[in-house]
Image (spheres, helix red, strand yellow):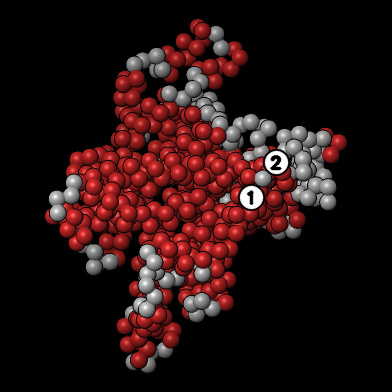
């Protein structure tokens, strides 16, 4: 282990470092699993963005004469009860899952970071109060909190975003606060303080940039669970609630009655959720390794 | 140690208090009047007012809250708006199913995860390690309901090896005594009933246990690899101890600590996962109850169940922390 590290150092030494982010990017691009993850995500992003071009049929319009047809050349993934093309619906479903997942995690991240930065930066009573609120939110298991929020706010994409975002925010807040607390006593922060830098300046310029990497990793991994949670809400009947919108979780619930006759209606949306989650999990693990070279699997 | 335990128990009280306030306000603000939900299309203003009065919904909010907390402290969670039964009585009937499911999932996750993790750690980056890594990646990426339906389709619908849904074949006429399907089946004294109850538990346990399985496997692997690189393991080998003895006495004893902690922390995700698993497999547990209560706007039930889930979650986390402090003498909490 130690000799490996030494070898790495020797090899790395002659090359001038091009900064943390470029080094990390280079390591990321050499990380096989992370590339696989990126490719999987790219496939879904392209599918979602170009859904109107790629999709052979309108995802909302079906032909009842064509109900529940197994996969064929005309309908790559078959058709559902209403005769709608399953492939087009899976493609359009990627739009909902990816946008809702990404926006929800971004909101959770932003909110969590503000709370975490205030708590970790200010300390004292404010920190104690904020952390108790976080404790309360964390005491309710994740998806249950999201379920309760959607039940409260009603159906709709915005409601799902709020629900998933709120259930993730405390995780980010606690993570950032922890990193900031650890950084508070480091030499470079003490040095900045001794030169008379103001607290907001120290927080924003010295501490936050050094606390970012675990947040990036956690956010990427959270995207995987967010996509699963969004589909889970849809599965429980708490999805967008608009039958014209194709959502992977709702598609699964609608088809669960036909498991015996039309298993493909479960398989394709299920595979879409799983593969996109695998993509974000692989990318997240790859980011973790490339942002922290000391950490080897 | 006692001081640490007392401090942790006291620390949980403000969390529960805060949660009770939030839940109370949160669910009072739910759109839709429960009286209207109960009466349906028969709702007239008089009837709505009558129901509101009988449920205490016409009193000021703080009175309603104080009554609610007073009830909680006496183990009285209130009654369902829908069927009029007390939350406590329905909970006692449904909770055993959830416990059975959670224990089944934990047995699956731990029973398979620890050997898999140890196997993968034996040759890090070998092909077995690779296969185990892929399996655990799959485990954390596949949603419970997707895995659940896949298992039902393969083993229930196609192969007919295992029952697809439910907990006990109703034709067996097992009298519910404890409401634990397996224990009731044992009490009935019929081998066929026990076999049936266990068979019904297998698929839901696998579906619910897939995420904990992946996590337990990863942690076991990482922990065993970590400990294997310690000097004392090399010393043990140098003394000429057999590989099995090094494994059992020197590596595993030290690798257990993070593994047990992580197992304890899975209970929260298992409770949350039970909501979906019970819905897929049509189990009459607490998880599927949450879903029906939300569909029916059954405020008291939703509020009480979230409170109970949080209470279980906090209790388990507390036990994990205490267990950690007991197991690890290097950690001294003030």
Q: Which residue is drawn at 86% across and 36% down?
A: A65
Q: Which residue is drawn at 37% across and 64% down?
A: A19
Q: Which residue is drawn at 66% across and 38% down?
A: A246
C-alpha distance separating marks 2 and 1:
11 Å
Q: In the rendered view, does A118 fall on the left or right side of B25?
A: left
Q: Does the image show residue A132?
A: no
Q: Earlier in the sequence, mark 2 or mark 1?
A: 1
x%, y% of residue B122? 48, 79
What is the quadrant of residue B10 in the picture? top left
Q: Do labels 2 and 1 share a chain?
A: yes
**Quarter of the picture holding the N terminus of chain A:** bottom left
Q: Does the image show residue A16?
A: yes
Q: In the rendered view, does B202 fall on the left or right side of A159?
A: right
x%, y% of residue A249? 62, 43
Disc 1 chain ID:
A
Residue furthest to the right in view is: A65
* In front of the other: B11 or A157: A157
Numbered circle sitting on residue A46: 1
Identify the residue under disc 2.
A52
**Quarter of the picture holding the C terminus of chain A:** bottom left
Give above or below for A290 relative to A183: below
Q: Total of numbered circles in the picture?
A: 2
Q: In the rendered view, does A69 fall on the left or right side of A190?
A: right
Element at label 1: helix
């Amino acid at each position: 282990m130690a000799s490996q590290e030494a070898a790495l150092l020797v090899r790395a030494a002659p090359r001038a470092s091009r900064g943390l982010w470029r080094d990390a990017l280079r390591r990321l691009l050499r990380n096989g699993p992370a590339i696989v993850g990126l490719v999987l995500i790219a496939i879904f992003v392209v599918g979602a963005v170009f859904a109107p071009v790629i999709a052979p049929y309108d995802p909302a319009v079906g032909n009842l004469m064509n109900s529940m047809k197994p996969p064929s050349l005309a309908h790559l993934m078959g058709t559902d009860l209403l005769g709608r093309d399953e492939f087009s619906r899976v493609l359009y479903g990627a739009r909902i899952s990816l946008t809702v997942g990404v926006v929800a995690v971004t909101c959770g991240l932003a909110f969590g970071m503000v709370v975490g930065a205030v708590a970790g930066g200010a300390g004292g009573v404010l920190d104690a109060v904020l952390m108790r609120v976080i404790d309360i939110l964390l005491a309710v298991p994740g998806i249950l909190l999201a379920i309760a929020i959607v039940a409260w706010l009603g159906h709709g994409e915005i409601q799902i975003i709020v629900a998933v975002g709120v259930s993730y925010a405390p995780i980010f807040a606690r993570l950032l606060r922890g990193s900031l607390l650890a950084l508070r006593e480091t030499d470079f922060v003490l040095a900045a303080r001794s030169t008379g830098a103001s607290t907001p300046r120290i927080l924003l310029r010295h501490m936050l940039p050094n606390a970012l990497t675990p947040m990036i990793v956690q956010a990427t991994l959270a995207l995987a669970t967010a996509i699963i949670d969004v589909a889970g809400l849809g599965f429980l009947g708490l999805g967008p609630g608009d039958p014209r919108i194709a959502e992977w979780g709702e598609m699964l619930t609608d088809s669960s009655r036909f498991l015996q006759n039309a298993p493909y209606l479960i398989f394709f949306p299920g595979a879409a959720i799983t593969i996109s989650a695998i993509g974000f999990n692989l990318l997240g693990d790859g980011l973790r390794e490339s942002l922290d070279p000391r950490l080897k699997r | 140690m006692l001081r640490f335990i007392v401090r942790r128990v006291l620390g949980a009280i403000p969390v529960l208090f805060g949660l009770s306030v939030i839940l109370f306000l949160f669910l009072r603000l739910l759109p839709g009047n429960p009286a209207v939900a109960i009466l349906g299309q028969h709702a007239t203003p008089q009837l709505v007012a009558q129901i509101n009065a009988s449920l205490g919904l016409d009193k000021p909010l703080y009175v309603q809250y104080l009554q609610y907390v007073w009830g909680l402290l006496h183990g009285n969670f209130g009654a369902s708006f829908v069927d009029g039964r007390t939350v406590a009585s329905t909970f006692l009937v449904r909770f055993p199913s959830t416990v059975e499911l959670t224990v089944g999932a934990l047995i699956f996750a731990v029973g398979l995860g620890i050997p898999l993790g140890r196997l993968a750690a034996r040759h890090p980056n070998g092909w077995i390690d690779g296969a185990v890594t892929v399996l655990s990646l799959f485990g954390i990426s596949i949603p419970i309901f997707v895995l659940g339906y896949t298992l039902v389709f393969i083993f229930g619908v196609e192969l007919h090896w295992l029952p697809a849904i439910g907990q006990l074949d109703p034709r067996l006429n097992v009298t519910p005594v404890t409401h634990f399907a397996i224990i009731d089946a044992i009490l009935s004294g019929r081998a066929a009933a026990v076999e049936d109850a266990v068979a019904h538990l297998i698929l839901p346990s696998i579906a619910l246990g897939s995420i904990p399985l992946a996590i337990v496997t990863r942690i076991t692997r990482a922990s065993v690899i970590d400990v294997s690189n310690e000097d004392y393991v090399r010393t043990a080998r140098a003394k000429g101890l057999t590989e099995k003895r090094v494994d059992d006495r020197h590596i595993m004893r030290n690798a257990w600590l993070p593994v047990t902690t992580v197992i304890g922390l899975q209970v929260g995700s298992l409770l949350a996962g039970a909501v979906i698993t019970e819905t897929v497999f049509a189990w009459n547990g607490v998880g599927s109850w949450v879903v029906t209560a939300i569909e029916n706007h059954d405020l008291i039930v939703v509020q009480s169940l979230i409170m109970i889930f949080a209470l279980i979650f906090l209790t388990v986390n507390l036990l994990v922390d205490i267990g950690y402090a007991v197991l690890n003498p290097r950690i001294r909490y003030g």
